[in-house]
Amino acid sequence: MSEPGGGRGFGSSVPQRAPWSLVAATAALCLVSATSVWTAGASPMSREEKQKLGNQVLEMFDHAYGNYMEHAYPADELMPLTCRGRVRGQEPSRGDVDDALGKFSLTLIDSLDTLVVLNKTKEFEDAVRKVLRDVNLDNDVVVSVFETNIRVLGGLLGGHSLAIMLKEKGEYMQWYNDELLQMAKQLGYKLLPAFNTTSGLPYPRINLKFGIRKPEARTGTETDTCTACAGTLILEFAALSRFTGATIFEEYARKALDFLWEKRQRSSNLVGVTINIHTGDWVRKDSGVGAGIDSYYEYLLKAYVLLGDDSFLERFNTHYDAIMRYISQPPLLLDVHIHKPMLNARTWMDALLAFFPGLQVLKGDIRPAIETHEMLYQVIKKHNFLPEAFTTDFRVHWAQHPLRPEFAESTYFLYKATGDPYYLEVGKTLIENLNKYARVPCGFAAMKDVRTGSHEDRMDSFFLAEMFKYLYLLFADKEDVIFDIEDYIFTTEAHLLPLWLSTTNQRISKKNTTSEYTELDDSNFDWTCPNTQILFPNDPLYAQSIREPLKNVVDKSCPRGIIRVREESFRSGAKPPLRARDFMATNPEHLEILKKMGVSLIHLKDGRVQLVQHAIQAASSIDAEDGLRFMQEMIELSSQQQKEQQLPPRAVQIVSHPFFGRVVLTAGPAQFGLDLSKHKETRGFVASSKPYNGCSELTNPEAVMGKIALIQRGQCMFAEKARNIQNAGAIGGIVIDDNEGSSSDTAPLFQMAGDGRDTDDITIPMLFLFSKEGSIILDAIREYEEVEVLLSDKAKDRDPEMENEEEQPSSENDSQNQSAEQIASGSQEVDLVDQEPPEESSLNSHPESLSPAVTDNAASISPSEQNFNPTENHETTSLDGECTDLDNQLQEQSETEEDSNPNVSWGKKVQPIDSILADWNEDIEAFEMMEKDEL
Ligand code: DMJ
């Protein structure tokens, strides 16, 4: 093995070489000495407590990895609720998410280097042998190039990196002869056909056996890919080239990066989310630092660190400057349009952006990292986990949480940068929440809905690749890790690549790397951490002082969006533009403003009012832009309100032995019966009704009396089933879908509607479960006979209390011993006819709702009441002074930013009307895209 040439820093640190020391190495310097600089603030954590927490992480990893190996391996992933492996093709398709699964024992490969970091060298040796013995990379399966690169190629390379390190130490892996590297090379060649495009951007998917385009491949026809998908290859591909001497991999990855750089929007220096791989046109022109773009930025900076190529740093700095100018609205990071970067593209943020503070630490820009991290932590404190998306006023936008590691990653890097024990306390909270809310008898289950605490039958491989590494390293002292973590860089999947690669096999020519950069002025380095002494100028409370004003940002926020208000309004002293949330169709002043903005009001025959904007009718281009913003806000407001009118999902929690509340199933609510959000939860044993469809008087009232009746969907109205079980004395009901294999993982939940008549006579709570969730209860009945459940709007904490309530012995092993078949099977064989369709909420029943319709050059929305005025928001705003404070604070920041940075006026240039019109269709498309947007 070559001598490591890496320098000292920490985790994602840098080798000591002069050319690139300006940014990355200085960041690392901050990190090294910060620990000793910190002396006050949060109480320091004792070595004993850190060790205790480290051991807890080890135990949690054993629980996750052990259950995967015992119940799922060689499948790609563990399904922790049904305690079996997820095999692609054998489960209902979940769409793109399944593209990570290539029938190559994904979780095992993704876990390899975690085993070494966690000091499980013996297990690592076993795992490598299993990979070499069992894993086949030649399956006829279509996989994501991006996911296969970061998880599998990265996993094999991380495993190889640590295998050769161990071999050199002389105790373990003495038999190892680069076998993982050979597999990595084989996989690398399998991915190369994806790059056969004129642009050099890879196809998003490839067939492991047949490549691209052949009829058998079932892929190769896609036209678009995400920026991160094309821009997150360089670390793994360059490492593969440098380890093997085969330069082609690094060349291909460089070419893709070069193309993306060429295609950046030249005036904003931002990139969009999706790009056409043939034409290079931006398909989605919204731009942020989260989903779809995130690791493109990460890899530019880390490619510089690993490869020492200045061009990557220059590109990163150019993008970073743009990000801080337009997207960063501390503590928020909000997507904007690449062509109009002063215009926010969304009023919500996604969970993937939680990696960004960690990247800012590597860059050396600590202050905004602390701010954004603190904001994210406040959201976590409210919901226990970071929801997949949340609004600018910190409401849940998408409620899932698939145990993503990004926040733990940033916490680790911030601790290394500041040495502030506050971040150890944050890590402790993460551990507690995982154990309390996500731990199930057979591993850790993703959260289906952070509001209800319900689970999804899913444990993604990145949970083992990343979460446990960052949490363990957070509490570890140097001697707790058997090698020097500072000699390695973390890939986006937290795989470890040795820094000595920077000086190995440097034969790759830089001919593909363009030399065209925007001139960098000094402001590009404004956010660079110069050194520790300046960052913490004798102020050990520095980080705390940045966090303090953000402590209550979530609790005190108003339930409304915070949208950047155009600065020129303030400057000229003019009134800020009319906001959608303030609009009242009966206010003549508002109607006048609408007219100026080119927005006309059409009174429809049915009493509704439609808004249509024609930019050309606006009084000026500024007014046209205001009109555009107004319409965008209206659409966002409308979809938000529609969401709020939906009853949120409910939870069915199995509380009896051996589940003790650890299994929480996502349930659909009913529009009739007891409202669980207003009343205490209902707890009871379950019993199947006879007839099972519950469509006539029950023949087994004695069995369901005082219990929660299980009824199958179909053959009559939901309300009729409810009446029949209520008459038999049931205290609640669970309707189980008759559509075999249906699951809340793959089908949207719905509300059970009434029967069109008065349903006040139904007083018991009714919930709906899809077939897969229902079969978990039915299987439990078969196995344990007595099964008790809790019906509620939010799962009750699974704490020892719940176990104590039971007299039966508790043992995780008991439940783990259930065979996969026992838990998985259980669909009922009942002949059924079509069941009732779920009733949709209509405009009439929800008079406030708006239905956006977007047409050529005009967007129209149709409020059903003329006086569109979300009073709830108003009241909250005017009653809660602190809400106003938050807005003012952001406003002030906006103004300060403007004062100190003359370039901010970019977005304030008066745009000619024809340019606005030219962009119009793009905006409409972008809005439509955003509405449909999925992570
Ligand atoms: C990981 O697979 C990688 O970190 C990737 O870059 C995006 N995020 C997932 C985990 O959330």
Image (cartoon, rainbow, N blue to C red):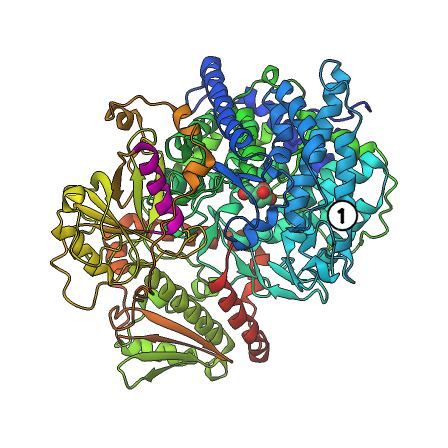
**In this rendering, position of residue 100 left or right of residue 185:** left
The disc labelled 1 sits on which kind of residue?
Answer: Lys
Q: Secondary structure at mark 1?
A: helix
Find residue 662 and report its image quarter.
top left
Q: Can see residue 233? A: yes
Q: Can see residue 536? A: no
**In this rendering, position of residue 184 left or right of residue 410:** right
Q: Is residue 102 above or below residue 647?
A: above
Tag 1 residue: 190
Residue closer to the observer: 554 or 539: 554
Residue at x 49%, y 14% (from the top left corner): 47
Q: Which residues are magenta?
A: 769-784
Picture coordinates of residue 615 (x, y %)? 49, 80
Picture coordinates of residue 829 (x, y %)? 36, 52
Residue 720 highlighted magenta (yes or no): no
Question: Could you tell me which quadrant the N terminus lies in?
Answer: top right
Q: Is residue 681 above or below residue 392?
A: above
